[in-house]
Image (cartoon, rainbow, N blue to C red):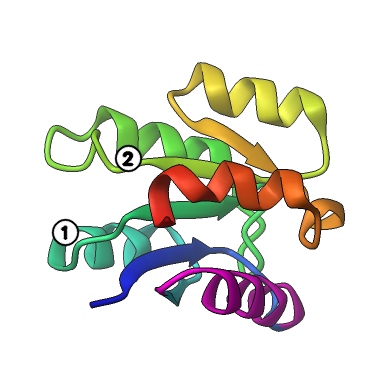
Amino acid sequence: MPKQVLAVGNCSYDQSSLKALIERSFDAKLLAAHGPADTLKMLREQTFALVIINRKLDRDHSDGIELMQTIKEDEQLKDVPVMLLSNYEDAQAAAEEAGAVPGFGKLALGKETTLKKLEPFLG
């Protein structure tokens, strides 16, 4: 059975690029959420191998790191691996401080280093 990945806060172009990368490279299925409410609902109702959160959520432009902190502070959800999707090194550092695993930026979607970051969770 394919592992599930939840991608949060991506525009349709980024979502389809991420979906193609993950579903082509791993036995995994990418699902989408757009904001804190639907993300938390999906995380409580389904099992995900990984959550990839955009730095700024596409619909309301809320802070992805704040959502990450909410997940990591929740007793039921804190062990779910989360990763930030951002090209900014300072944002990646802040995400890791909040409990995220090392993430990647949109510019690195096709790179081998990105697949190596995804492998421990999806391989």
Within-10-Å neighbours for mark 1: few <14, some 14–19, many 20+: few
Magenta region, residue range: 13-27
Residue located at (87% from left, 54% from top)? 107
Q: Nearer the viewer, residue 30 or 71?
A: 30
Check if residue 85 falls in the magenta segment. no
Q: Nearer the viewer, residue 64 or 78?
A: 78
Left or right, 95 with respect to 75, comes to right
Left or right, 105 with respect to 69, comes to right
Sequence-first tag of 1 and 2: 1
The secondary element bearing badge 2 is classed as: helix
Hey, what amino acid is under mark 2? Answer: Ile
Residue located at (55% from left, 23% from top)? 96
Report whether residue 88 is seen: yes
Residue located at (58% from left, 64% from top)? 9
Residue 31 location, x and y as percent? 42, 76
Q: Is residue 4 above or below residue 68?
A: below
Residue 5 location, x and y as percent? 41, 64
Q: Is residue 86 above or below residue 72?
A: below
The secondary element bearing badge 1 is classed as: helix
Q: Nearer the viewer, residue 22 or 13?
A: 22
Q: Which residue is mark 1?
A: 44
Hey, what amino acid is under mark 1? Answer: Arg
Assign the N terminus to one quadrant of the image. bottom left
Q: Is residue 27 above or below residue 76?
A: below
Magenta segment, principal secondary structure? helix
- Between the C-alphas of marks 1 and 2, the distance is 10 Å
Residue 88 lies in quadrant:
top right
Residue 2 location, x and y as percent? 31, 75
Report whether residue 67 is seen: no
Q: Which residue is mark 2?
A: 71
Residue 69 lies in quadrant:
top left
Residue lying furthest top: 97
